[in-house]
Amino acid sequence: MAVSKHILLIIGGGIAAYKAAELIRLIKKSGMTVRCVLTESGAQFVTPMTLAALSENEVHTTLWSLKDETEMGHIQLSREADLIVICPATANLLAKMVGGIADDLATTLLLATDAPVLAVPAMNVRMWQHAATQRNIAQLRSDGIMVMHPDEGDMACGEYGPGRLPEPESVMREIVNCLSGETGVHGQNELGPNPLDGQPAFAPNQHRPLRGKHVLVTAGPTHEPIDPVRYIANRSSGRQGFAIAAAAADAGARVTLVAGPVHLPTPAGVMRIDVETAVEMEQAVHDALPADVAIMVAAVADWRADSQSGQKIKKDGAAPATLKLTENPDILAGLARHEQRPALLIGFAAETEKIAEHAKAKLEKKSCDWIVANDVSGPIGESVMGGTDNSVHIVTGTGTEIWERLPKMEVARRLIAKIGEELA
């Protein structure tokens, strides 16, 4: 890394602000220079004197400093940076960035800059998981802002979950990646350790192939009630769909994820809509339109009970109760006929035999553009359904690609890259 790189570090409010001191030390140790902007709330946790001593530069705290505006105006301060890092980035700061609000020095700099920006969120777990914060993360990614995932762990408030500021060493690695044009900005995510770590992923602007696009993803099973305690379902875990949603967000897309009943945290930057039945999923999909790309990963139950019992059906020693079934709506085929059909419509097919043959038939029958066929045969513990790996056939109008067994996050990354090439 060249020694001439200049980092502008914006320190937001929050108990995690104390970690900025160690980050400054690491930046200096790498041979880069660092200037600090301390927000009013950040100054409640760390002092300008501490930051000035560590950075060996004046710390900027206000938009209204006559001296600063004479010698180092806020526009010049933003222009000289090779990278602006917001650490910690509070929910309030992220929301202001989305709205283009410029009511203090930090937000004015962010609105005035054309330098790349890396946001490192830190906040309470409930604040991080709130729909408003996730919408803001999605919009920032779409705007080309790089956003790290927070770590998961114990909070200062006593709660546990995602929202902790990543350790300074992790942030420093991301800074180096940003300046070298290689960034995953995903860190440790909800689907386990990120297999993209250490590999070139989607960098800002020209390397974010889905920037400005709306991607609609369905994931997980559906549960079709029989009575208050029983339902028809399958073994889908939702992991592949959630991985695809995360990869699409990393690629700069605005992502809507319609999820069946699964126990997976929402990927950062993704708008999640929870449903239970196929009928609810179909309605949520239609409500989310228009979309540029739709990736129908969910394993939707083919049938549902014709009528649902209001009470638990009891065994009475006689013959088993007859269960009359009715067919569920075909969400994929219906979307293909919809007046707001996405430009690229991709279906998934869970198959146990003749994978390519069945996938080609489904491609024609559903009138979609691609079919991604999973081989879900094998013992329960080793099957794609519920597992962490996947092997797929990508069937299009021009041929078939076979991807041997890979981690689901890697399948997602490759699929999103292929989608980016197709749209380009």
Image (spheres, rainbow, N blue to C red):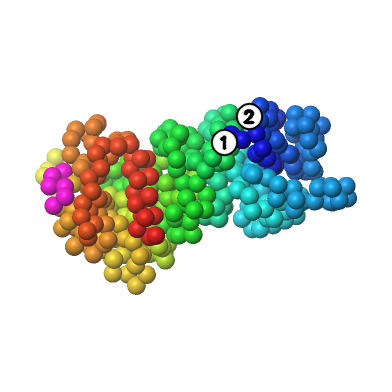
Q: Please state which of residues 256 and 144 is positioned toward the viewer in this rendering.
A: 144
Q: Does the magenta stretch include residue 201?
A: no
Which badge, 2 or 1, comes first in the chain's sequence?
A: 2
Instruction: Name the quarter where the N terminus is drawn.
Output: top right
Q: Where is residue 415 in the image (x, y as percent from the top left)?
A: 34, 49
Identity of the residue drawn at 69% across and 55% down: 112
Q: Name above or below for residue 151 compared with residue 137.
A: above
What residue sits right under mark 2 in the picture?
Answer: 30
The residue sitting at the bottom extreme is 339
Mark number, residue 176 = 1
Q: Would you call the spot at circle 2 few (<14 residues within 10 Å), some (14-19), or many (20 or more)?
A: some
Q: Quadrant of residue 329?
A: bottom left
Q: Does the magenta stretch include residue 354?
A: yes
Q: Where is residue 158 in the image (x, y as percent from the top left)?
A: 60, 30
Q: Please state which of residues 298 and 363 is positioned toward the viewer in this rendering.
A: 363
Asked if residue 193 shows in the view, the reply is yes
Mark number, residue 154 = none
Tell whether 211 sits left or right of 417: right
* Stretch of the chain drawn in magenta: 352-357
> Is label 1 in a helix, a strand or a loop?
helix
Q: Would you call the spot at circle 1 few (<14 residues within 10 Å), some (14-19), or many (20 or more)?
A: some
Identity of the residue drawn at 52% across and 33% down: 152
Tell whether 389 sits left or right of 130: left
Q: Quadrant of residue 409?
A: top left
Q: Where is residue 270 in the image (x, y as percent from the top left)?
A: 47, 50
Q: Do the residues labelled 2 and 1 touch (CB within 8 Å)?
A: yes
Distance from label 2 to label 1 (Cα)? Answer: 9 Å
Asked if residue 227 shows in the view, the reply is no
Identity of the residue drawn at 81% across and 37% down: 58
Tell whether 404 sits left or right of 123: left
Inspect the image, locate mark 2, and give the three-letter code of the amino acid beneath it: Ser
